Image (spheres, rainbow, N blue to C red):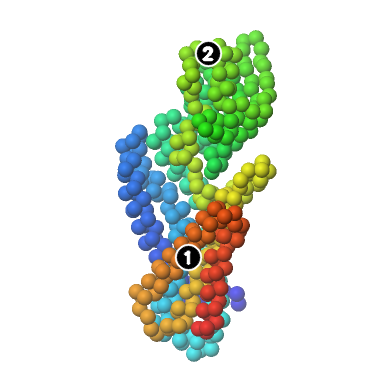
Amino acid sequence: MMFGTLDRYIGRSILLTSLLVLLTLVALASIFAFISELDDVGKGAYTVSGAVQYVFLTIPGKAYLLFAPAVLLGSLLGLGALASNSELTVMRASGVSGARIIRAVVITGVGLMLLIALIGETVMPRAEQIAEELRLTALEKRLSVKGSRGLWLKSTNHYVNVGTVLPDFTLLDVSVHRFEKNSLVMAMSAARARLQDDDWLLEEIEITLFSASKVTNERLPNMTWKQFIRRNTVTSNIEGLSENYPDLVSADVLKSISVSPESLSAIDLYDQVRYLKDNQLDSRRIELAFWVKIASPLSTLVMLMLSLPFVFASQRSGSAGQKIFIGIMLGIIYVLLNKLLTQLALANDVSPALSALLPLMCFLGVAIVGIQRTT
């Protein structure tokens, strides 16, 4: 039987305590996040209810980040309770081997790993996107709506749509429409736009001008946004524009709306890595985020296995406080080691895959050695 009574009993013990720990950690993180958001309440249309909605929408992201430490603490408490009540001792005396108990823990870990992977690929990216939309819409008056068709902004009489915003603020699938007296007079599309100094460099441009008598179309390899405005100001005889040209997109808006790579799905990260490599651009930061995304669900299983040596070594000894302290210290060490290696990877051209998976392999090795010495 793949999932018997023992597996369900041990799994339920781990699951209940892990969820309780996760709820506690997420609640604390959300309270601190809400207190931080209160600094922006009153700016623009950002209200207390808006801050509450924003914090609520970021809960899946917080749960995703805190899931592995919560599972470690929950496993230490859940299995520790079984050990303190002599239930593990009774299991072993009844002929249940340590390997059988480990199998039950691993089965639970696989289930939790699949659950958090599903949240990270579906719920979290969308919730983070909606949260940033809500917050920025309230704080940034120029922003209209960021929906399923990308980011929409208004720049004087230009309506700008951006299909994708990369973490380095490169814009993909840019289109600009200008209306005069409720009539479309110009449409421009660019494959991408890169921020250079205080201007945007548009690439692979197609411009269409509309007049009462004709429609003209032109293709250009590249052009800066200011050059485009100057050129089309003269071409279409727009009055009232001086050297104070409107921005294509405000860099501050992008900094606010750009969701961190860690909040994107693995599929989106893979697509970005492929795009950057195809265009011979630096993809290390996105590659690193991709491999961290792959490693995060696996860390849930490793954290469960890491708790087993401490439980087997102290089946009748050790208080809950000691187990919590051990879990907190191990969680802190894992997070610090993970952050250290990722920063070193970016600074020293280390393989993103190696830097993301190395902490996982180290802790897995520690868990295996500890299990072998205590069972």
Indicate which disc residue 299 carries.
none
Tag 2: amino acid: Ile
* 220 and 114: which is toward the camera: 220
Residue at 38% x, 71% y: name it.
Answer: 324
Find numbered disc 1 in the image and state the secondary structure of the residue it sits on: helix
Packing grade of label 2 (10 A; few <14, some 14-19, many >=20) is: few
Disc 2 to disc 1: CB gap under 8 Å: no
Q: Which residue is mark 2?
A: 238
From this view, report whether residue 34 is shown above or below residue 335. Answer: above
Image quadrant assignment for residue 202: top right
Residue 338: give x, y in percent of width and height: 50, 61
Residue at 48% x, 37% y: name it.
Answer: 254
Packing grade of label 1 (10 A; few <14, some 14-19, many >=20) is: many
Image quadrant assignment for residue 359: bottom right
Q: Is residue 325 left or right of residue 98?
A: left
Residue 342: give x, y in percent of width and height: 53, 57
Indicate which disc residue 334 carries.
1
* 145 and 245: which is toward the camera: 245
From this view, report whether residue 264 is shown above or below residue 1. Answer: above
Residue at 50% x, 87% y: name it.
Answer: 92
Residue at 42% x, 35% y: name it.
Answer: 137
Image quadrant assignment for residue 351: bottom right
Report the residue that reaches farthest toward the top.
Answer: 213
Tag 1: amino acid: Tyr
From this view, report whether residue 69 is shown above or below residue 10. Answer: above
Report the residue that reaches farthest toward the front.
Answer: 348
* 221 and 300: which is toward the camera: 221
Residue 87: give x, y in percent of width and height: 44, 83
Quadrant in the picture for the N terminus: bottom right
